[in-house]
Amino acid sequence: MPSIIEEIKSRLNIVDVAAGYLKLEKAGGNFRARCPFHGEKTPSFFISPARQTFHCFGCNRGGDVISFVEEIEGLDFQGALKVLADRAGVALTREKIGAKDERAAIYSALELAAKFYEAVLPKFPEAVRYLSGRGLSDETIKRFRVGFAPDEWRALGDFLAKKGITQKVMEQAGLIVISPQGFYDRFRGRLMFPITDSSGRVIAFSGRILKEGEGKTLGASASAKYVNSPETDVFHKSRALFGFSQAKDSIRQKDACVLVEGQMDLILSHQAGVTNAVATSGTALTVEHLELLKRFTKNLVLAFDADSAGIAAAHRGIELALSQDMTVRIAALPSGMDPADVVRKNSADWVNAVSNAKHVIDFYLELLPERNKDKNLLRTRISEIVIPLIALLKSSLDQGYYVAETSKVIGIKEESVWDEVKKSSRPSLVSSSGDQLTRTVPPTMSRRLRIRNLIDGILLWQESAGGVMLKDISEYRARLEKLEEGPPPDSKVRDVLIFEAEVRFQASPHLDKELEELFKGLAEEILRDKFSEKMTELKRAEESGDLALAEKLLAECQAISKELHALTKPNK
């Protein structure tokens, strides 16, 4: 019987999967595209239909269809499996995707909680009336899996316990709070909005009280308007976007993402037909959010009230997006209204606001003169707001255009505007935690670490299985330790590595050959890293004028390059 992974691969072609994300060009027997994982103008990303693999010669990423979905969707292995299984029409049961793994247990608890809240909602007419009063249709409520948490101390906890979920897992999932007197449900007396990852798995919840006047009637357990799940192993608020799994296909098709703030804004936007919208759910826009969106589009539409508070709230997000080489447009809203208000009044007005969104600099060049009739004050505001945005543009053509437009608005020569743009730099862009912008980019697993983990996983799997598919495991282990020293993985990581190796390679007729290819790839990555380190040392030596050291390092770089060439040249 074929493994799940082999069944998925037999039904899907990597070319068809990649074509859903990239514009592919035929290149002989292969296909090529601009790499989605790093910026480039000349395509260096290749897909081999014969091998069912991809490789980028620019950033050196590569792998099979599962690796591709992992990278482009920002998912873990199990999440990528779910995306592909859904596409292939393959049933992916929990037991087959690692029910013993702690993360899988957390996902299971969260999914059961979502079903519980959904089932409870119809039993609370007040909650149903509130949703209806806000304009949500039954179909929309069902699509976004909106539910309700009863105002009882242990309604959810008792339900999950009967399903075999332990208190430890409930707490790890952020569903209960454990106190000296026992545990109680984190969410009580609230409308529940599930937050999902790219593959549609529930990773957290956002709970909203009903209208403030109804809070006491239903016995709402806390006064905060929204309560969100705490950070967990599967939920990181700086990376999660509400509605992303429902919006991602539309974002890709429309080549634009509309960013709103709250759950109701998002849900009503989709109901009105603007289905490429996502929400930050009250958290600040982060570089991690933008990195996720950039895999699908570089065009961002921000919706906000054009009053002073709205502008201030959006400005940091605008700067972050421009610094990530994204195009930012503004969908202006009537004063004092959010997208949900606009949709309820007239959904066509929201559709038109998005369709007529203006580039952020055009928007400011129209708005600021209306707000600042005094020319001296206008110049000050342009200098504070517009000039730094022009400086962040990556295209010199775009910069030239907006320098000319700014010059017309404030009535001074373009040369003076250019001088201000050159003086304006933003090295101090920081995250909400105070870190420099360059530090806010999430660490990505290097190809070297990915390969090392695959080798480790295969060896751990075969060691636990008694070497049924692989002989001389100790010899392979010695080779790995010689290439890459490091502490053994902890039990949690060990289980994940074994699972991934088993699913990927259990149907392989020649595991030894697969392993040799992985060892070759690991050796190649080690050499590349070594070469990069030596080149950095060489540059420092040249800058310091140490010619003897520079000559020595140059020779070492040449030797590494020769070794790398010998390792990577194709066999005749």
Image (cartoon, helix red, strand yellow):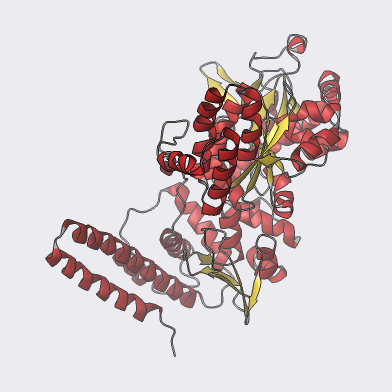
Q: Is residue 337 left or right of residue 52?
A: right
Which residue is rendered at x = 51% and y = 40% of the image?
413
Q: Is residue 261 left or right of residue 130?
A: left
- Above-or-below relation of 153 to 32: above
Residue 338 image offset from top left, x and y in percent: 73, 26
Residue 33 image offset from top left, x and y in percent: 60, 68
Q: Work out which quarter of the rendered image holds the N terminus and state it.
A: bottom right
Q: Residue furthest bottom?
A: 572
- Above-or-below relation of 109 to 446: above
The foreground one among 166 and 315 is 315
Q: Work out which quarter of the rendered image holds the C terminus and state it.
A: bottom left
Number of dots carrying numbers:
0
Which residue is rendered at x = 17% and y = 56% of the image?
544
Residue 400 image offset from top left, x and y in percent: 54, 49
Q: Is residue 65 left or right of residue 465?
A: right
Figure quadrant of residue 455: bottom left
| Residue 91 visible (yes or no) | no
Figure quadrant of residue 567: bottom left
Residue 43 image offset from top left, x and y in percent: 56, 69
The foreground one among 70 and 248 is 248
Which residue is rendered at x = 46% and y = 69% of the image?
467
Figure quadrant of residue 439: top left
- Above-or-below relation of 106 to 157: below
Q: Is residue 208 left or right of residue 349?
A: left
| Residue 296 visible (yes or no) | yes
